[in-house]
Image (cartoon, rainbow, N blue to C red):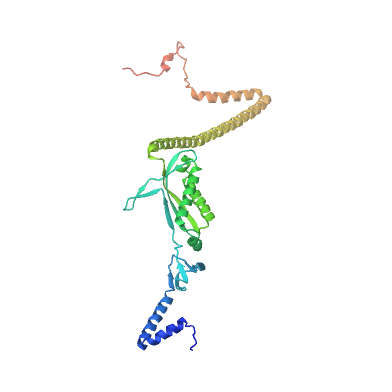
Amino acid sequence: MEELRETTWKDLLFSGLRVIPFRSRRFILSIVAIALIVYLLSGIYAVGPQQLGVVVRFGQVVAAGVAPGIHYHLPYPIEKVYKPRTAEIKKLFLGVRRKGTAGTTQTKGLEMLTGDTNVLLVQAVVQYAISDPVKYLFATEDPQVVVEAAADEALTRIVGSMSVDSLLTTEKLHAQTLVKQRMQAILDSYNVGLKAIGAYFQEIGPPVEVAYAFRDVASAREDKNRLVNEAQGYRNHVIPTTRGEAERMIMEAQGYSKERIERATGEAERFLALLEEYKRSKDLTASRIYIEKMEKILPRLKIYVVDRGGKSGISNLRLLLPKTSKR
């Protein structure tokens, strides 16, 4: 009785190959060898200049942050490669609704309530990028949904904490910075490997129904600012001019006072000196003073010498009057 023995798959394979002719066996082995080579070569992959490679082996990350270039990994299904575009800046538009089959867009804006209970229509664009490719790939199923939720929450919070006047005028840029910071804090709490690059208001304004009232308020505010600026300009012009005029008048008064004091001092000294001379020689000093005064007075007068040596000793003083022309 023959002994029964277990037949393995290798025995079956080789026994089957013995039945096949030699040439056919060579052809089949060549096909198998080529298929094996092609399978092994399928592990060659290229990482683009804006990408980073992440290699996963049976669901576990074995290589993260593979640099751009040509690389090799064990063929599928042993290892799999993901190549997220980490250098690309992605954009997300808020307040834009798509309609129709042709992909046409209708811009309306998000209706948001400000801190002073006014309604604004906001259209914004958010820019973000991948900071950690592993977290980006495996922390969430749809990273864009997370970004949209974070951006919407940040935008609602910041707009709701500020007044409508500040959002429409001076604090618009500051509000954009606050939205970016708040969005980054939310993304960090989710730990999804994303970073916020920027948040920008494309359009921010009142609804159409109250746009005219807002324009009137804005015009009134501009008129107020213009009048205030004009008043400030007039004030800045008048005050320095008046101050300069006051300083000039003060300097002139001080100069006049100094001149008067010096002149009075000189007159007093001259009078005292003259008094001393008068005390020493009264007649001579009095005569000199009389002569000096007459010298000052006489140049202003016309002196006429009248000869009264005639027979009657009477002169006609009309002859001394200026002659008038006769017509």
Residue farthest to the top, as pictured? 312
The quadrant holding residue 325 is top left
From the top left corner, tell me how far across and down residue 52 is, in percent.
Answer: 47, 66
Please give the name of the residue rendered at 48% of the width and 36% of the height, measured from the top-left corner. Answer: 232
From the top left corner, tell me how far across and down residue 243 is, in percent.
Answer: 53, 35
Residue farthest to the right, as pictured? 280
Tell whether 298 sits left or right of 35. right
The quadrant holding residue 42 is bottom left
From the top left corner, tell me how far across and down residue 191 is, in percent.
Answer: 53, 57
- Residue 139, above or below 322: below
From the top left corner, tell me how far across and down residue 152 is, in percent.
Answer: 46, 49
Tell whether 315 sits left or right of 281. left
Q: Which quarter shows the C terminus?
A: top left
Residue toward you, 6 or 174:
6
Residue toward you, 104 or 295:
104
**Residue 169 shows in this picture:** no
Residue farthest to the front, as pictured? 1
Please give the name of the residue rendered at 47% of the width and 54% of the height, measured from the top-left corner. Answer: 146
Residue toward you, 88 or 303:
88
**Residue 260 shows in this picture:** yes
How many numbered marks, from 0 up?
A: 0
Tell whether 5 sits left or right of 24. right
